[in-house]
Amino acid sequence: MNSEQPEERGTPVGRRVFLGTLGLGALGVAAAPVLQRGMESFLAGAAEKDPTGLTGLLPNGGGFRYYSVASSVPHKNEGNYRLTVDGLVDRPMTYSLDDLRALPQTRLVRDVQCVTGWRVPETPFEGVRLSRLLDAAGVRPKAGAVRFTCFDGVYTESLTLDQARRSDVLVALRMQDKDLGHSHGGPVRLYVAPMYFYKSAKWLSGITVTEDVEPGYWEERGYDVDAWVGRSNGRDDDPTS
Protein backbone atom coordinates (compact mmCIF):
# COMPACT_ATOMS: atom_id res chain seq x y z
CA MET A 1 0.00 0.00 0.00
CA ASN A 2 1.20 3.50 -0.76
CA SER A 3 1.49 5.82 2.22
CA GLU A 4 -0.84 8.81 2.35
CA GLN A 5 -0.63 12.29 3.70
CA PRO A 6 -3.31 13.14 6.29
CA GLU A 7 -6.53 14.12 4.60
CA GLU A 8 -7.40 17.79 4.48
CA ARG A 9 -10.72 18.13 6.28
CA GLY A 10 -13.38 20.49 5.01
CA THR A 11 -15.37 22.83 7.22
CA PRO A 12 -19.17 22.86 7.34
CA VAL A 13 -21.06 25.56 5.48
CA GLY A 14 -22.49 28.10 7.93
CA ARG A 15 -26.16 28.39 8.91
CA ARG A 16 -26.85 31.53 6.86
CA VAL A 17 -25.33 30.00 3.77
CA PHE A 18 -27.28 26.79 4.37
CA LEU A 19 -30.59 28.65 4.64
CA GLY A 20 -29.74 30.57 1.49
CA THR A 21 -29.08 27.35 -0.37
CA LEU A 22 -32.57 26.11 0.41
CA GLY A 23 -34.07 29.19 -1.25
CA LEU A 24 -31.80 28.90 -4.25
CA GLY A 25 -32.64 25.20 -4.48
CA ALA A 26 -36.31 26.00 -4.85
CA LEU A 27 -35.50 28.64 -7.44
CA GLY A 28 -33.35 26.13 -9.32
CA VAL A 29 -36.19 23.62 -9.48
CA ALA A 30 -38.68 26.20 -10.76
CA ALA A 31 -36.34 27.71 -13.33
CA ALA A 32 -34.52 24.56 -14.39
CA PRO A 33 -35.76 24.32 -17.99
CA VAL A 34 -34.66 27.91 -18.73
CA LEU A 35 -31.43 27.99 -16.74
CA GLN A 36 -30.22 24.70 -18.16
CA ARG A 37 -29.69 26.30 -21.56
CA GLY A 38 -26.60 28.45 -21.80
CA MET A 39 -25.40 27.78 -18.23
CA GLU A 40 -23.45 24.55 -18.51
CA SER A 41 -20.17 26.02 -19.74
CA PHE A 42 -20.27 28.65 -17.01
CA LEU A 43 -21.05 26.14 -14.26
CA ALA A 44 -18.29 23.76 -15.27
CA GLY A 45 -15.68 26.26 -14.09
CA ALA A 46 -17.69 28.05 -11.44
CA ALA A 47 -18.47 24.96 -9.39
CA GLU A 48 -14.79 24.38 -8.67
CA LYS A 49 -14.29 28.03 -7.64
CA ASP A 50 -17.31 28.41 -5.38
CA PRO A 51 -16.32 27.42 -1.81
CA THR A 52 -19.90 27.50 -0.52
CA GLY A 53 -21.43 25.17 -3.07
CA LEU A 54 -24.12 27.73 -3.92
CA THR A 55 -23.28 27.62 -7.62
CA GLY A 56 -24.05 23.94 -7.57
CA LEU A 57 -27.69 24.50 -6.77
CA LEU A 58 -28.28 25.75 -10.31
CA PRO A 59 -29.03 23.05 -12.91
CA ASN A 60 -25.92 21.38 -14.23
CA GLY A 61 -25.17 19.06 -17.14
CA GLY A 62 -27.23 15.88 -17.12
CA GLY A 63 -29.78 17.38 -14.75
CA PHE A 64 -27.51 17.12 -11.67
CA ARG A 65 -26.19 19.86 -9.43
CA TYR A 66 -22.75 20.03 -7.85
CA TYR A 67 -23.22 20.57 -4.12
CA SER A 68 -21.07 20.17 -1.05
CA VAL A 69 -21.73 20.91 2.61
CA ALA A 70 -18.00 21.52 3.14
CA SER A 71 -16.08 24.61 2.09
CA SER A 72 -13.54 22.44 0.24
CA VAL A 73 -13.19 18.79 -0.73
CA PRO A 74 -9.82 17.15 -1.46
CA HIS A 75 -9.47 15.23 -4.72
CA LYS A 76 -8.70 11.51 -4.65
CA ASN A 77 -7.49 9.21 -7.43
CA GLU A 78 -6.12 5.71 -8.07
CA GLY A 79 -2.94 6.51 -6.15
CA ASN A 80 -4.36 7.81 -2.89
CA TYR A 81 -7.98 6.67 -2.61
CA ARG A 82 -8.76 4.20 0.19
CA LEU A 83 -12.06 2.82 1.49
CA THR A 84 -12.10 1.26 4.95
CA VAL A 85 -14.64 -1.24 6.31
CA ASP A 86 -14.48 -1.54 10.10
CA GLY A 87 -16.51 -1.46 13.30
CA LEU A 88 -18.42 -4.58 14.36
CA VAL A 89 -16.68 -6.89 11.89
CA ASP A 90 -14.33 -9.84 12.22
CA ARG A 91 -12.03 -8.77 9.39
CA PRO A 92 -11.53 -5.02 8.95
CA MET A 93 -10.73 -4.27 5.31
CA THR A 94 -9.07 -1.52 3.31
CA TYR A 95 -9.72 -1.22 -0.44
CA SER A 96 -7.90 0.74 -3.08
CA LEU A 97 -9.74 1.88 -6.20
CA ASP A 98 -8.17 -0.96 -8.16
CA ASP A 99 -9.31 -3.43 -5.49
CA LEU A 100 -12.92 -2.27 -5.87
CA ARG A 101 -12.74 -2.36 -9.65
CA ALA A 102 -11.54 -5.98 -9.51
CA LEU A 103 -14.68 -7.12 -7.66
CA PRO A 104 -17.88 -8.20 -9.47
CA GLN A 105 -19.80 -5.14 -10.65
CA THR A 106 -23.56 -4.56 -10.64
CA ARG A 107 -25.33 -2.11 -12.97
CA LEU A 108 -28.60 -0.42 -12.00
CA VAL A 109 -30.67 1.99 -14.06
CA ARG A 110 -33.11 3.95 -11.90
CA ASP A 111 -34.53 7.44 -11.52
CA VAL A 112 -32.55 9.68 -9.17
CA GLN A 113 -34.91 11.67 -6.95
CA CYS A 114 -33.79 14.60 -4.80
CA VAL A 115 -35.85 15.53 -1.76
CA THR A 116 -36.00 19.14 -3.03
CA GLY A 117 -37.99 18.04 -6.06
CA TRP A 118 -35.64 17.56 -9.01
CA ARG A 119 -35.40 14.19 -10.72
CA VAL A 120 -33.01 12.66 -13.25
CA PRO A 121 -34.72 9.71 -14.96
CA GLU A 122 -33.14 6.38 -15.87
CA THR A 123 -29.65 7.06 -14.55
CA PRO A 124 -27.15 4.18 -14.78
CA PHE A 125 -24.93 3.45 -11.78
CA GLU A 126 -22.33 0.70 -11.57
CA GLY A 127 -20.37 -0.62 -8.64
CA VAL A 128 -19.95 -3.25 -5.97
CA ARG A 129 -22.94 -4.33 -3.92
CA LEU A 130 -22.46 -3.09 -0.37
CA SER A 131 -23.61 -6.49 0.89
CA ARG A 132 -20.54 -8.07 -0.74
CA LEU A 133 -18.16 -5.83 1.23
CA LEU A 134 -20.07 -6.50 4.45
CA ASP A 135 -19.92 -10.26 3.88
CA ALA A 136 -16.19 -10.09 3.17
CA ALA A 137 -15.62 -8.27 6.46
CA GLY A 138 -17.74 -10.67 8.51
CA VAL A 139 -20.48 -8.73 10.29
CA ARG A 140 -20.82 -9.60 13.97
CA PRO A 141 -24.14 -10.80 15.43
CA LYS A 142 -24.87 -7.69 17.52
CA ALA A 143 -24.55 -5.37 14.50
CA GLY A 144 -27.69 -3.55 13.40
CA ALA A 145 -26.61 -0.63 11.24
CA VAL A 146 -23.94 0.81 8.96
CA ARG A 147 -22.46 4.32 9.17
CA PHE A 148 -20.80 6.02 6.21
CA THR A 149 -18.15 8.73 6.37
CA CYS A 150 -16.74 10.84 3.56
CA PHE A 151 -13.39 12.39 2.77
CA ASP A 152 -14.86 15.89 2.74
CA GLY A 153 -14.50 15.51 6.52
CA VAL A 154 -18.10 16.59 7.19
CA TYR A 155 -20.78 14.43 5.58
CA THR A 156 -22.10 11.25 7.18
CA GLU A 157 -24.99 8.86 6.54
CA SER A 158 -26.43 5.66 8.01
CA LEU A 159 -28.58 2.71 7.01
CA THR A 160 -29.98 -0.18 8.97
CA LEU A 161 -28.14 -3.42 8.30
CA ASP A 162 -31.15 -4.81 6.44
CA GLN A 163 -31.27 -1.71 4.22
CA ALA A 164 -27.53 -1.89 3.58
CA ARG A 165 -27.83 -5.52 2.44
CA ARG A 166 -30.39 -4.73 -0.27
CA SER A 167 -29.34 -5.68 -3.78
CA ASP A 168 -29.99 -2.11 -4.99
CA VAL A 169 -27.46 -0.47 -2.66
CA LEU A 170 -24.05 -0.01 -4.27
CA VAL A 171 -20.61 1.28 -3.54
CA ALA A 172 -20.63 3.03 -6.90
CA LEU A 173 -17.63 3.61 -9.18
CA ARG A 174 -19.44 4.70 -12.35
CA MET A 175 -22.43 6.86 -13.23
CA GLN A 176 -24.00 7.49 -16.64
CA ASP A 177 -21.54 4.96 -18.12
CA LYS A 178 -18.48 6.97 -17.02
CA ASP A 179 -16.12 6.77 -14.09
CA LEU A 180 -17.40 8.92 -11.25
CA GLY A 181 -15.84 12.36 -11.44
CA HIS A 182 -15.09 14.51 -8.42
CA SER A 183 -18.20 16.68 -8.81
CA HIS A 184 -20.42 13.59 -8.67
CA GLY A 185 -18.74 12.28 -5.52
CA GLY A 186 -15.95 10.28 -7.13
CA PRO A 187 -13.97 8.29 -7.30
CA VAL A 188 -16.39 6.31 -5.10
CA ARG A 189 -19.79 7.15 -3.66
CA LEU A 190 -22.66 5.35 -2.02
CA TYR A 191 -25.76 4.75 -4.16
CA VAL A 192 -29.01 3.86 -2.38
CA ALA A 193 -31.40 3.42 -5.29
CA PRO A 194 -34.79 3.34 -3.49
CA MET A 195 -34.14 6.37 -1.26
CA TYR A 196 -33.86 10.11 -1.76
CA PHE A 197 -30.46 11.10 -3.08
CA TYR A 198 -29.15 12.61 0.17
CA LYS A 199 -28.70 9.04 1.39
CA SER A 200 -26.24 8.37 -1.48
CA ALA A 201 -23.21 9.91 0.21
CA LYS A 202 -20.56 11.37 -2.08
CA TRP A 203 -16.78 11.00 -1.63
CA LEU A 204 -17.17 7.80 0.36
CA SER A 205 -14.18 6.88 2.52
CA GLY A 206 -15.46 4.82 5.45
CA ILE A 207 -18.01 2.07 6.10
CA THR A 208 -18.41 1.34 9.82
CA VAL A 209 -20.70 -1.40 11.09
CA THR A 210 -22.45 -0.24 14.27
CA GLU A 211 -25.03 -1.51 16.72
CA ASP A 212 -27.59 1.25 16.08
CA VAL A 213 -28.37 3.78 13.36
CA GLU A 214 -26.62 7.11 13.87
CA PRO A 215 -28.39 10.07 12.23
CA GLY A 216 -26.41 11.51 9.33
CA TYR A 217 -25.64 15.09 8.33
CA TRP A 218 -29.10 15.93 6.97
CA GLU A 219 -31.00 13.86 9.52
CA GLU A 220 -29.44 16.03 12.23
CA ARG A 221 -31.00 18.96 10.38
CA GLY A 222 -34.52 17.57 10.21
CA TYR A 223 -34.57 15.10 7.30
CA ASP A 224 -36.00 11.60 7.72
CA VAL A 225 -33.59 8.82 8.68
CA ASP A 226 -35.60 6.42 6.50
CA ALA A 227 -35.71 8.23 3.17
CA TRP A 228 -37.81 5.96 0.94
CA VAL A 229 -38.93 7.84 -2.16
CA GLY A 230 -42.62 8.62 -1.87
CA ARG A 231 -42.87 7.53 1.77
CA SER A 232 -40.82 10.16 3.61
CA ASN A 233 -40.13 13.89 3.76
CA GLY A 234 -43.44 14.73 2.06
CA ARG A 235 -41.93 15.86 -1.23
CA ASP A 236 -42.86 13.08 -3.63
CA ASP A 237 -46.06 11.09 -4.07
CA ASP A 238 -44.82 8.21 -6.22
CA PRO A 239 -43.44 5.29 -4.15
CA THR A 240 -42.50 3.37 -7.30
CA SER A 241 -39.98 5.94 -8.57
Image: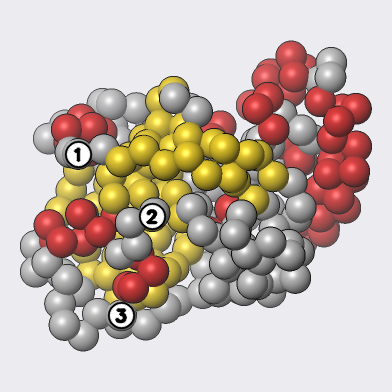
C-alpha distance separating marks 2 and 1:
14 Å
Q: What residue is disc 1 on?
A: 104
Q: Earlier in the sequence, mark 3 or mark 2?
A: 3
Residue 96 placement (x, y as % from top left): 21, 37
Q: Residue at x 20, y 54 (%)?
A: 132
Instruction: Give the SS element for disc 1.
Output: loop
Residue 30 placement (x, y as % from top left): 90, 43
Question: What amino acid is at disc 1?
Answer: Pro
Q: What residue is disc 3 on?
A: 144
Question: What amino acid is at disc 2?
Answer: Val
Q: Quadrant of residue 64?
A: top right
Question: What amino acid is at disc 3?
Answer: Gly
Mark 3 and mark 1 in contact? Answer it, CB < 8 Å. Answer: no
- State the quadrant of the C terminus: bottom right
Q: What residue is disc 2 on?
A: 169
Q: Residue at x 30, y 41 (%)?
A: 106
Q: Quadrant of residue 53?
A: top right
